[in-house]
Amino acid sequence: MKVVLVQDFEGLGAFGDVLNVKDGFARNYLIPRGIALPATESNLKHVSTIQSHKRRKLERQKQKAISVANEINGKVFELLRQVGKGGKLYG
């Protein structure tokens, strides 16, 4: 039976992978636990849509991180902490 994974499953695959597994494994374990869906046209389209949303969200986060990195690049930060005897922070 062909299934599409809707979450990562160690030893089997990652989100969005289309796999051919035994019918009993799919019907009795993967599908009831929400790990996979039958690989129908609508389910494949649904998973593809989710993947594209995740990619866009990751790209936005990456651009935001790059802008923050550019903003703090070259700046000097000084952290003040109280130290104990001998100049040690801990123990």
Image (spheres, grey):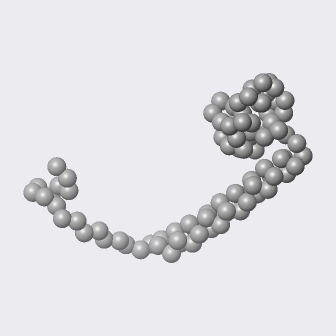
Seen from the viewer's position, the closer of residues 28 and 59 is 28
List x then y, in percent, for residue 66.
Answer: 57, 67
The residue at the point 51 percent across, 75 percent down is 71
Residue 9 location, quadrant: top right
- Whether residue 24 can be seen here: yes
Question: Picture coordinates of residue 10 (x, y %)?
Answer: 63, 33
Q: Is residue 14 in sight in this rendering?
A: no
Determine which quarter of the picture holds residue 8.
Answer: top right
| Foreground residue among 56 and 24 | 24
The residue shown at (57%, 72%) is: 67
Closest to the observer: 18 or 67? Answer: 18
Q: Is residue 76 left or right of residue 29?
A: left
Q: How many numbered circles are shown? A: 0
- Residue reaching furthest to the left: 85
Identify whether 56 is placed above or below 5: below
Picture residue at 35% right of the left edge, 71% below the top: 77
Q: Position of residue 41 (x, y in %)?
A: 90, 46
Q: Is residue 75 left or right of residue 64?
A: left
Which quadrant of the figure has residue 55? bottom right
Left or right, 34 with respect to 68, comes to: right
Identify the residue at the far right of this view. 41
Q: Is residue 69 left or right of residue 59?
A: left
Q: Please identify the quadrant where the N terminus is shown.
A: top right
Identify which residue is drawn at 16% across, 61% down: 83
Q: Position of residue 65 (x, y in %)?
A: 56, 66
